Image (cartoon, coloured by chain):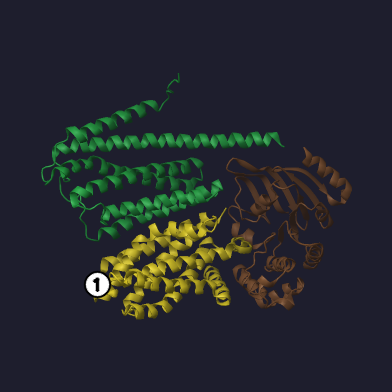
Amino acid sequence: MSFLRQIAAIIRKDIIAELRTKEMFSSMFVFALLAVVVFNFAFELRVADAATIAPGVLWVSVTFAGMLGLNRSFVLEKDRGCLDGLLLAPVDRSAIYFGKMLGNFLFITVVEAIILPIFSALFNVNLIQTWILVVLLLGTLGFSGVGTLFSAMAVHTRAREVLLPVLLFPVAVPALIAAVKLTAGLLDGQTVADMANWMQLLVAFDVILIAVSYMTFDYVVED
Amino acid sequence: MKTLRLDRTTTLNIAAAVAVVVALYLALVQAPAPANVDTEAQSYAQRIIYFHVPHAWVGFLAFLVTFLGSVLYLWKGERRWDILASSSVVVGIAFMTATIITGSIWAKPAWNTWWTWDPRLTTSTVTWLIYVSYLMLRSALDDPARRARFAAVYGVVGFVSVPITFFAIRWWRTIHPVLFDTSNMGLSPNMRFPFFFSLGAFTLLYFVILIQRVRVERLADEVERLKAATLASRRW
Amino acid sequence: MAAIEIRNLTKSFGSLLALRDVDLTVTEGEFLTLVGPNGAGKTTLIRIVATLSRPTSGEVWVDGWNLTDGAAEVRQCIGFISHQPLLYGDLTAEENLRFYSRMYGVPDPANRIEEVLEQVGLLARRRDAVRTFSRGMQQRLSIARAILHRPAVMLLDEPYTGLDQQAAAMLDEVMRAVGTASLTVLMTTHDLHRGLVMSDRVAVLSAGRLVYQALRADLDEASFRQVYREIVAV
């Protein structure tokens, strides 16, 4: 199946490039860490129990750090005209979408994997629970899905670092709300069955937005 | 002395103007005062419903038009759908801003707060942000074809996310009067006429402004076309 | 059979008409150089043939495949070189080629990669990151990338831009070694001298219109320069 082979090739290429420079990873990681620390200080004086704000802070840190990665991903393609290289190949444009999207998803989750223990320690909450990890992955997936589409657009503008958050945040709101609600609920001891509607919403968001992104990606990359 | 230009849309413009004035009268003077409020301020504030709700509906209508225009542009690639989509966004944002402001004015006497993160208000704000972002995207792109294409994609994705956002936000606690739960919409029979009249008047206003905006865009395109043709023929 | 056939090609960007009703044919094995001043539409034209841009109206066939329904087949049989190398700076020469071999489904990739690196004289630098390459070297690697999947048609968009004399000469050498003699080549350039050296035929594009065509055999450089000057001075 050449479609899958091509997606794998794109992901592999991005991983190799990233392993060599570690640029995306380091900036995402440092940013997430800074965000966590700053929020810790910002809220400490007013909030009695740090666990209350933990879900919110986690997701804000993840989304902002994620945006750095999303941006960088397409800047690399714009450099030296590589996007043309991708378009010249006999590859379905959706393969390019999925290749970049899964690559982004992978990078963000790696950063999350490292941030999570640190976060748990700083906020004194146990985030390493199965369902919380599931929510983290689902939220990141939807975010990467729409984020890849929008960063492909933003990279063509002068103000690309500013434009991506502007485009992405309003659209990603439902996923963010659902993710925070679910994380908070799980920390409180609720079960996923109690919050079934939020879970459904998150999954629905992922499915619908990834589908729409994949369908409109052609229009964004082709001239 | 400047003469007034009369054309096909003038009748519509006048009709809209008259309708809005009549709606104002009906809402502020003729409509009966609400029965179940405590203070006089709340009694006056309640009259905002004749503006606030129609503005919200028209705002969403505008964004629906943008969605349709975006889909048609992606499908057909004709500039006129792009003009329709972008013109509607601007009018939609204006109506949405009015919705949020009137909502805030109503909120103070009713719930003693200028703002509250309740479903409808939050959804409206997020929607407003999506369409402001739409305009920011447009202004960041110079190539007209790319601008139209990207804006159309964002118009589609943005619109699709709105219902999901609505449900997400709705499942929070709400203190917003939910109009569709009760059978008579929270409005007494005497209030229904001014309400629907107001809705009609503002919808008409929307179309009038939309038509004028589309015209301006078309004229701007024409100017560009003439400019390009003149420069090409000069060959300096 | 014509390797490249262009009929009534028009491309507009909004109200700007970049190409006006262009008809052009390149026969199999022919080397056609398209010259013209800046803004004539050369890059626009070649990008359309390379499937990177869509025509506003008109038809284009490459190796018998129509661009609209046979886009994937067209892409399999063309190799594109522009002034940008289309290579990932952080990857090595080898890794870049390995990536493209996967994208094009090149059989026996390891040997093929070694073969093309040898042909462009970069075998010794295979494990170096492209970031460290000079402009000339990047362009040579770009050729390796373009011929990796053995395309029948080569499209070159101003390949000499930014190259000094030595690098340009080396590029010519590499193109000869690669066997452009047996491939169909469409090249755009505004360097008239280079345009004549290797080509079988020349054509002139001005303000989006094809205004002149001639066989290389019928021309000498001086007369061609004169003709060119007259055409673009209008």
* Disc 1 residue type (three-letter): Ala
Q: x, y (%) of residue A128?
A: 34, 80
Tag 1 residue: A193
Instruction: Give the position of the C terminus of chain B as an image quadrant.
Output: top right
Q: Which chain is green?
A: B
Residue nearest the observer in this picture, A71 or A94: A71
Residue nearest the observer in this picture, C93 or B5: B5
Q: Is residue B139 left or right of residue A198?
A: right
Residue nearest the observer in this picture, A205 or B179: B179
Q: Is residue C151 left or right of residue A6?
A: right
**Can residue C153 be seen by looking at this rendering?**
yes
**Can residue B179 be seen by looking at this rendering?**
no
Q: x, y (%) of residue C133?
A: 70, 71
- Please identify the residue farthest to the front as the structure is shown: A45
Q: Which chain is yellow?
A: A
Q: Residue A91 falls in which quadrant of the image?
A: bottom right
Work out whether C85 lies above or below C117: above
Give the colour chain C carries in the figure: brown
